[in-house]
Image (cartoon, rainbow, N blue to C red):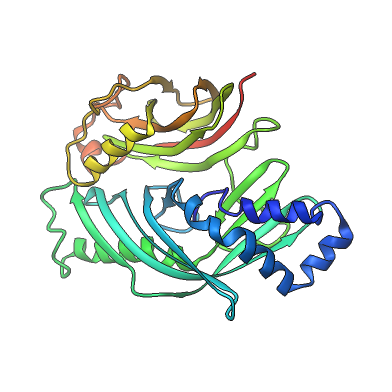
Amino acid sequence: MWGERAWRAALIALAFAGVEGCGLFRGAVNNSPEVRWWLFSTFGASQMCPEMLKRSAPLRLMNGGNVIGRLFPTACQHRVDEQRMTVSLEFTGTGYAWTPIAGRVGFSAHAGVEYRADFSLQDDATYVWARAERLLFAPEFRVGSIENRLVDWAQNQSPVGYLTNTFGAQVTQSQLLSGFTVVRSEDGDAFSLGILMPPERPRQPFRSGGEGRLLVDADSAEVRVEQVDFLGPITIEESGQSLFFKYGVVGPSAEALLWNRADADAWRERLQTGAALAPPAAPALLGFTLNAGATEEQRVPLPPGQYVLVVDNSSRVGRVNPPWNPLLNAVGANPLILSYRLEVGETP
């Protein structure tokens, strides 16, 4: 369920073997499970945890739905089982999500899952799959904060307690067991929960904006009134690179604000443990309005470093405030739907 570059080392190994551009070798590799496993276990398995720790995982209340929250891994371990030809991941993380009744919820999670990894070399793309074999133990899901103080979140007998259990299961179990697919093509690497077979491609709001750009994230997120969403982290590896943010907004206009990752992570962690929504002590590096209507693209030249782009649909952080309606705001209606594509590439 992790980001688009998690399997890049294995794919680089395939390039070294000369198999991506040659039909003869493609057929030989595709027809040999042993060769595919050797390539992945030798070059790709050790990269799974480092890549997982570089990015967040989107959370949804239903498959195919908009993103309503994110899980940020903080620790990870992997183990290769040569006999079973599987890779096991055990990880912990924290995150947030918006849910009906409770509003913004902060949580922590601990889970372990065994994956059977495989790939296929096609004429125009490389497909990499992680099929879930089994959960290593019962996933742990702990609520750290609840926005709606009137809700008795702890009582499992209550409707909200049922919602807690249901949401926790969706976050830590059903999404893990759906497996995932990474498709590498000339447009970059694209990620999707579930197993996609050629010629299927992961659903993305927008296509690549240009040759040589590295895809960071592409999705559709639902940001409720008086909420914020954290996109990234975004890594600028060398001078002369820019962040490219292509987006379309349905609903009220909002604002995008850029912070250094360290400042954004510290702020997010405070919110997840119950701090009231307010801007962090460090000022944003820059900001721009997300106008509803036509598709737009922002280009932001940046020095090397790690950054987070925060989507603000609140009246407490940026300068763009959502329309105020006491009833609708209280129940989280009239959300902002943001379709976006985040890329990093050379500054024109």
Q: Tell me residue 144's x, y (percent).
A: 20, 53
Q: How many numbered marks does the figure carry?
A: 0
Q: Tell me residue 195's x, y (percent).
A: 60, 63
Q: Quadrant of residue 288?
A: top left
Q: Tell me residue 11's x, y (percent).
A: 68, 54
In this orientation, which residue lies closer to the viewer: 185 or 313? Answer: 185
Residue at 34% x, 66% y is 169
Residue at 68% x, 68% y is 38
Residue at 38% x, 34% y is 261
Residue 274 in view, yes or no: yes
Instruction: Give left or right: position of 147 versus 40.
Output: left
Residue at 32% x, 50% y is 95
Q: Quadrant of residue 206?
A: top right
Is 89 rendered above or below residue 308?
Answer: below
Residue 200 in view, yes or no: no
Q: Tell me residue 190's x, y (percent).
A: 61, 48
